[in-house]
Amino acid sequence: MALTITTAMITATVTMAKSRTRPLLRSSPRKRGPRKVKNRRASRGRTNGRLESAALYRLMAWLSPAYPVGAFSYSSGIEWAVEAGDIRDADSLTAWLATILSEGGGFADAVLFVHAHRASANEDTTALRAVAELATAFVPSKERFLETTAQGGAFLEATRSAWWCEAIGRFEVAWNGPVALPVAVGVACAGHGIRCKTALPAFLQALTANWISAGVRLIPLGQTDGQRVLAVLEANVAAAAARAVNVPLGDIGSAAFRADLASMRHETQYTRLFRS
């Protein structure tokens, strides 16, 4: 009888223990669920952070004055504009560059960059060839052609050696003619997964900084004044980048006639420091 009672007591105890542990077993997956979601989100954040850091690193490298494209030797006609008296000081340099960014070669380069980036990201070789061909045909003078294609070719050569990607290989198969700078940079940025809305303002800022550098040497202008001009033109760069995204390739155009004439007149300028 004692044994029967002891067995019953043990059985009851085990049953009670199981009934108490069941809710814990049912609730434990629910507790683990949110932790897993949180970990996935943290992982995505770390991945996005690494991608953004890589994009910033590469943009800073490619658009740096130290990148071997020879940008320092070109002025886009600013040298003639200084000699002619169109550009005399920081204010006139600011006005000149604002026009180029909104209505001239700077804005045209922005549109070409957008379409080269888009075609490369979509692996659309037909569209990419059309952009590359138009970019070289659209330049207004011999020296501007030299400026954009010499830098574009040098950019592709350096990037192919140090930062090769499949997009560069596809582009070189699709197009074997001269390469304009905005097309070359757009292809590389798309190939490395750098978004257009990030890359385009950086590209335009680099162009603007190089024009200002030419002005600083030619006017001459102090380094601090040059930075003031760059700061004032920040809004112009942002506006040009935002507007260029929505411009069809067939609507590209330029209305900065004085700047185009300056690049033509520079070809016969007697004393020159720059190649354009």
Image: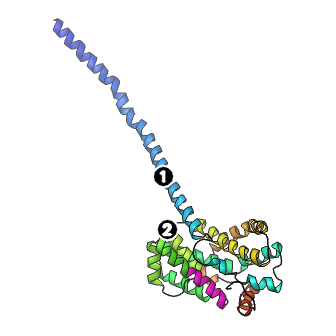
- Colouring: rainbow
Residue at x-position 62% and y-position 87%:
145
- Residue at 48% in and 86% down: 176
From which residue to which does the magenta span run? 139-152
Residue 123: tell me if it is visible.
Answer: no
Which residue is at the far bottom?
268
Up/down of 16 relative to 199, above or below: above
Q: Nearer the viewer, residue 163 or 123?
A: 163
- Tell me which corner region of the image, top left, top right, bottom left or bottom right, holds residue 222: bottom right
The residue tagged 1 is 44
Query: SS class of the residue under badge 1?
Result: helix
Residue 131 placement: quadrant: bottom right
Amino acid type at image mark 2: His
Amino acid marked by disc 1:
Arg
Q: Residues within 10 Å of mark 2 (few under 14, many from 20)?
A: some
Instruction: Identify the secondary structure beneath mark 2.
Output: loop
* Residue that badge 2 annotates: 192
